[in-house]
Image: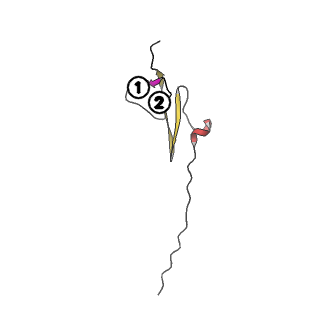
Amino acid sequence: MRAEHNFMATTISDIDECKDPSLHICKDRTICVNHPGGYNCTCAPGYKPVNKGQTKGLGIQCKSKFKS
């Protein structure tokens, strides 16, 4: 008796949400960083998180590193 196995290959491709502003919620003073399966927002150079301890996330808010 011979066993036969049929396997189907599935290809999953990552969508780069950062290429299209309508696909991410990173806004002023933040940068969109794509990763497999999603993205994060991080503070742009010269800015730091408003909430201490938060370095990235979808709802991150950033302020200037320099006192005004």
- List x then y, in percent, for residue 5: 50, 75
Residue at image position (56%, 58%) is 11
Res 66 → quadrant: top left
Mark 1 neighbour class, 10 Å CA radius: few under 14, some 14 to 19, many 20 or more:
few
Instruction: Verify CB contact (< 8 Å) between mark 1 and mark 2.
Output: yes
| Nearer-N-terminus badge (1/2) | 1
- List x then y, in percent, for residue 53: 37, 29
Instruction: Give the Cα distance between marks 1 and 2.
Output: 8 Å
Res 65 → quadrant: top left
The stretch in magenta equals 47-53
Kind of residue at disc 2: Ile
Please, what secondary structure does the residue beneath circle 2 have?
loop
- List x then y, in percent, for residue 28: 55, 26
Q: Is residue 42 magenta?
A: no
Q: Which residue is mark 1?
A: 51
Please, what secondary structure does the residue beneath circle 1 have?
loop
Q: In the displayed structure, would residue 64 be above or below residue 30?
A: above
Q: Residue furthest top?
A: 68
Q: Is residue 51 left or right of residue 25?
A: left
Residue at image position (48%, 81%) is 3
Q: Which residue is mark 2?
A: 60
